[in-house]
Every structure is written in C-alpha cells, then in structure tokens.
Image (tube, rainbow, N blue to C red):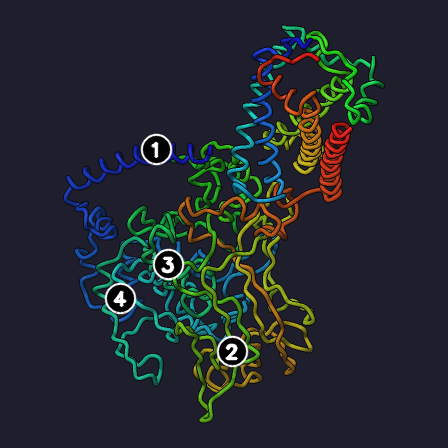
Amino acid sequence: MAGRIYLFKRFERFWHWSQAALVITMLVTGFEIHGTYSLFGFGQAVSVHTLAAWLLVGLWIFAIFWHFTTGEWRQYIPSFDQIGAVILHYSYGIFLGRPHPYKVVPERKHNPLQRLAYLWLKLMINPLIWASGIAYLFYANWRDLAPAWLGLEQVAIAHTLGAFLMLIFFIAHVYLTTTGHTPLAHIKAMITGWEEEH
Amino acid sequence: MMDSLIRIGGRLARHAGGACLLAATLNAAAQPAGAPDTPPARAEAKRSTADHGKFTQLQKPFKTGEEVTEACLSCHTEAARQVMATKHWTWDFKQVQTGQRLGKKNVLNPFCIGTRSNEAFCTTCHVGYGWKDDSFDFKAERNVDCLVCHDTTGKYKKIPGLAGHPAYHRMEFPAKSGKFIEPVDLNAVASHVGKTRRENCGACHYEGGGGDGVKHGDLDSSLSQPDRALDVHMDKHGLNFSCATCHQSDGHQIAGSRYAPTAADPHAAIMRGEHGDRNPATCQACHGDKPHKPSFAKLNDHTRSLACQSCHIPAFARGGVPTKLSWNYATAGRLDAAGKPIKTLDAHGHVIYDSRKGDFVLGENVVPEYRWFDGTVTYTLQSDRIDPSRTVSINTFHGKPGAPDARIWPVKVFHGNQPYDKVHRTLLLPHTAIPDDTAYWYNFDWDKALRAGAEASGKPFSGQYGFVQTEMTWPITHMVAPKEKALNCVECHSRQGRLQAITGVYLPGRDRLEWLDTAGYSLAGLAFLGVLGHGTLRIVTRRKRKEH
C-alpha cells in the first residue's frame, strides 16, 4: 500500500527552484561571457550574470540560515551505510526494474550517493564559484595588494573551473531526477513536497 | 535587462538636466547679449570688456603683419615674449625624459618629411613672419604673428611660400594657376581680434601633412562646424567647445602636447583653484578617472587599463574628410607625355597620385589600432642609423603591457616609403617646396633635392639613395563620440575583437586556459553522453521487461 511522506518543506522548495533558475541563468550568461557563444551580447550577459549572482548570494544567506536553524544541515553528513547497494542499484538493479534499496525518511531524505554529491556541491563547487566570483567582481579593489602571481587571469580560471564543475553536476542532477519510480516522480516531489511511497 | 533600467535612469536624469538647460536658455533670452540666434563667437565678443574696433592704435592702415604686431604689443606688452617661449615659435623642443631634440625644426615624418630647406613653405604654419632660412631673427618681437591665432573674421590667411606672411598685394596663387588672391585687409582683421576659435587652430592643425585631414586622422576641417555625432564636446548646437576649452593656455603656453603626452591621468577632476602640474587637456581633468555611473558592467574598472579614447572614439576621420593612411614616395616623378606633373583623383575627387609626392592611400571612418602607451615616445631622427631591411619606426610609442602608468590607446598607424641614404643608412630630408633649381616638386630630380636638403640640414649625403618602408604612430584623441556611440563591450570582449593583439591583460571573452576549456567541454560532453546512455538502457530494458 503506497503512502506518502512530506519530504521538502515550503522554503526548501522555494530555495531549490529559485536556485535552479539562477544557476541556469548564470551558466547561460557565464559561458557567453567566457566567449563560448554569443546570445544576449557581452554587456547584457555581464549585467544579467552579476544581478543573478547577487540574488543567489541573498538566497544562499537565507538557505544557510535555514539549514542551521532547522538542523537540516545534518542531511549532508556523509554516510557510507548501504553505499554499495546504491551504487549497485544505479549500475545494475535499475535496469532490471528493481526497487531502490534506500528507504527515504524525512530525517534521512538523501541516499548516501546524494549526500556525497550535495556535500561536494556545497563544500567544493559553490565555495569555489563564490570566492572566485566575488574576487572577480571586486578585482579593482584588491589587485594592488595581490602577489604578482595572482591576477584576474587566475581568478577567471578558477571561476571557469567552478563553472564546468557546476555544468557537469547540473547534467547529472537533472538526469537523476528521472530515476524515481516514474520519470517525473522526483520532480513532482520537489514541487509539492510530497514523495509517494512504494 | 539591467542596462535598460540604467538607461531609463539616465533618461530621467537628462530630463532633469533639460529643465536646467531650459531655465538657462530663458535667462539668456532675458539678456540682450545672448539672443538665441546669436552665434556663440559673437555672444562671447559682446561679453568681452574690450572692443578692438574702438582702439585708436588699430585705426590706421597697416602695410604688413609686423606693423599689426607692433600695435598689439603696445598694449599687450608681454605677449610676444610669451609666444616666443613656446614650441609654436621655436619649433624646437628638448624632450627631457628621452633627451631627444624634437620640434618641427628637428623631426622627420613620412608626409612632407622635414622643414629644413623648405622653411618659406612650411612656415605658413609658424606663428611668425619671415622665417625663410637660418637668418630668421627669433628675438624680434615684431616677427610674432598675433593674427593667425586671434583673427575672428576668417579672412586672414598665411600663404604658402611667403614665409608666414599673408598676401599684402593681389597675387596669383598657386603660381601660374590663373587663380588670384586678394590682399588681406589688416585693419579689418586687427579690429576684430578675439579668443582663438576652432578655425584658427585648424588652419594649421587640420592641414598637417600638406592638406585637410592628411596627418592626424582625428583633426580635419569637419571639426570647424561639427555635429554631436562627430564630436560631443565641439558640437556646434551643443557644448560648442573651442580647442582652447580643453587645451587651456596659460601665458600662451598651451596644454596638451604630442611630444610629451599624458597617457594616464588616474585622478579625480581638477578642482577650480587647485594647484599642481596636471595637464588640463586630459579627459580626466574634467571627468575624473571614475566617470561612469555605477553599473554591473564595471566600466570604471576599465580606466585602469584603457585610455578613455579607446572606447569613446570608435573610429577616426568620421566627418567626411579622408585621412592619409600611406604615402609612397618611390612612385613620385611620373610625368605626362608633355613632361608635366600629373594628379590622379579617386571617385570622390581626392588626390591619390601626385607626381610631386607619389601614391597615397586614403581612408574614412578608420578603425584605430591599439597600443600600450605610457606617454614616452622616441623618434628616429635624421642622424639615427636605420636598418633599411625592416620597416623603420619614425616614432615609437612605449608602454609596458599592463603597467600601472600605461594605458591602451587608439592610434593611427601611418605607412610611408621615403628616401634614405644607402651608404650612411640614415633617413634623408629632401628639398621640395621652394620653386628653384633643386626642389623636387619643380625638378623631379631626387639627387638634387636630397643633396640640397642634406646640405641645408647639415647632414651628409652619399649620393646613393633608396626608399625605405616607414611607419608613424599618431595618438587618436579628438572626435569623441556621444556616449551612446561608444564602443560596445563585444568589440573587444571577443576572440576576434579590436584588442586581439593586446597583451598584459586578461580579457574575458577573448582569453581562456585552453586545456581547461578542452577538459571542461569534454567532461561535460561525456557526462551528457553517459546519462544519455544510461537513460537509453533504462528504456530498452524496461521495454524488454514489459514484453516478457
């Protein structure tokens, strides 16, 4: 008998989707600034990218506050319990139509692979993008204090590295949303907050 | 998106500014001196405390320019001595930084090459009377020409060949042309003197290199009555600046020098009364070095690397007057069947071949080249040894890429091909412009012309000459476009942009770390293929399960 559990609270969903929109915006404009293609024009791309960056900074401040006040940050503590079973599922079991070995409960809503992936995102990719992005924005203010080896080029390279990591995360993340019991099950859960149980 | 918001803000601000302007216009209308249809020059004349038409010193017939000068000096007692201390008078300038002796008397260029032996012609643009050879008295105050800069009638013209004099008698000019010049009415000109106008400066500075717009590319007669699109500051319907508005003079010393330019001026605007040795002719002298409204485009951060001119002068020779881009003396001297010199015109009626000078390439709306420039320029002078196997730089703009004292400047690079001495390996100065037995323009004999030029300038000539490729760099700083016509970001922030060849800066949109890009795109591609494969396999296995 299928029941359902309330997995994603209202702020969490708002945070997720607005962050998604901002990250997509920044990937699109960022790679234009990088010279990969031309779409809005360099100047417009820079303006939109920078505006989106500041909105995301604001959003992240709220999100960090939310994680700590609700204790939700614990969701990202790495756990290797069942990790072998989860890896086996995605590389084998999923093709046989076997059910996911990980049982989701609101206190542990991410499987061990998700925990590691999101921790990697939050502790590596995001800080790299933040730090290099802010250094990029305020380059004029610190360039005279910087050692000779550190200039706009190094900042831009770090930012580009972050952008590629984010792009790869984005591709994998979007695909994995389709691996629920139906292709749209996870997305539905992220919209309504309710995950159908099987 | 944000840019449009900022634009709307700007529009509102302009409306507010417009209201002020309207108020100012109404105020002006209330005063008889500033009737709306009064040309600015007249209005200014009426504001002056002196009407030169009423000075008895000037109410007499003058036979020569020198006589007018004496009358001027009877009141303006220090003026001649002030002028005599300037490059406009000495044509001689010791560049302290580089130790080189510059000035029109000393430098060579790839246009008419040099002034020595050609003085009577070249000194049409000297602020004096009578410099036709070394016997000229640089100490005689009456030799200073006040009128060429202070005439407001536009009727005072110095005639080439007369060593700086205007026509005092009716004369045929050019010689044997059948065209005649009427004598100048010195009395009328003298009673209408005033502040310098664009046309006064332009009479020489537009005409450098032997004709309108030839030399600079950003200075030509279109700037006498420019519209806003051509020059936002000199716009005849708008700010209507004269040259001296920026090139402020102090005791006839005029600010802003090509021999000692200010390449970087990282300071706020100069306050009234502020003491210091800053050049008042820079953009920053009025606008400061953070002139842009705050925006996400970080425009103010650009002032650390770029001269204002690089973005705000998108092209030069924009006023309909072409500038010369190259000049090839090696083809000069071709005559017609009757042995007469010829001229060839292009479709617009501009000379592109002249027997006296060779072939020209002209250009309009020319996109500048860009150079790092810290204000130091060195010249190849007549005594310097050259390497004729390479293009000789008549002048070299110095500046270390990315250095704090250097900026990326727009420049016109002019290409020449001019005579040099094959034995001494020096550039040669031909005698050209004076109708005599040796001048090239009248005899078409390089040997005679080069010998006479070398003799006059005290330099050796071996008798063996050839032509060497040269180039000369000219800073582009006039013809500032309105801000909406400033360069779009992508003109430089792209792979094939205007700053393609500029080093010393990381330029987003142009620069990248190749291996990181390759790795990044490859891994993202692999990730995409990976999920695609995984997904396909899921669909396929699912179908198979259903079939069973």
| Viewer-proximal residue among B8 and B28 | B8
Q: Earlier in the sequence, mark 4 or mark 2?
A: 4
Q: How packed is label 4: few (under 14 Cα within 10 Å), some, or many (20 or more)?
A: some
Drawn side of residue A117 relative to residue B268, left or right: right
Q: Which residue is label 4 attached to?
A: B155
Q: Quadrant for residue B483, please give it.
A: top left
Instruction: Give the amino acid at mark 3.
Output: Cys
Task: Tell me the CA gap for discs 1 and 2.
Answer: 53 Å
Q: Quadrant for residue B136, please give it.
A: bottom left
Task: Tell me the CA gap for discs 3 and 2.
Answer: 28 Å
Q: Which residue is label 2 attached to?
A: B358
Q: Secondary structure at mark 2?
A: strand
Relative image position of residue B246 (x, y in whole percent): 40, 47
Task: Tell me the CA gap for discs 1 and 3.
Answer: 35 Å
- Label 4 or label 1, whichever lies nearer to me, is 1
Relative image position of residue B154 (x, y in whole percent): 27, 63
Mark 2 — on which chain does it sit? B
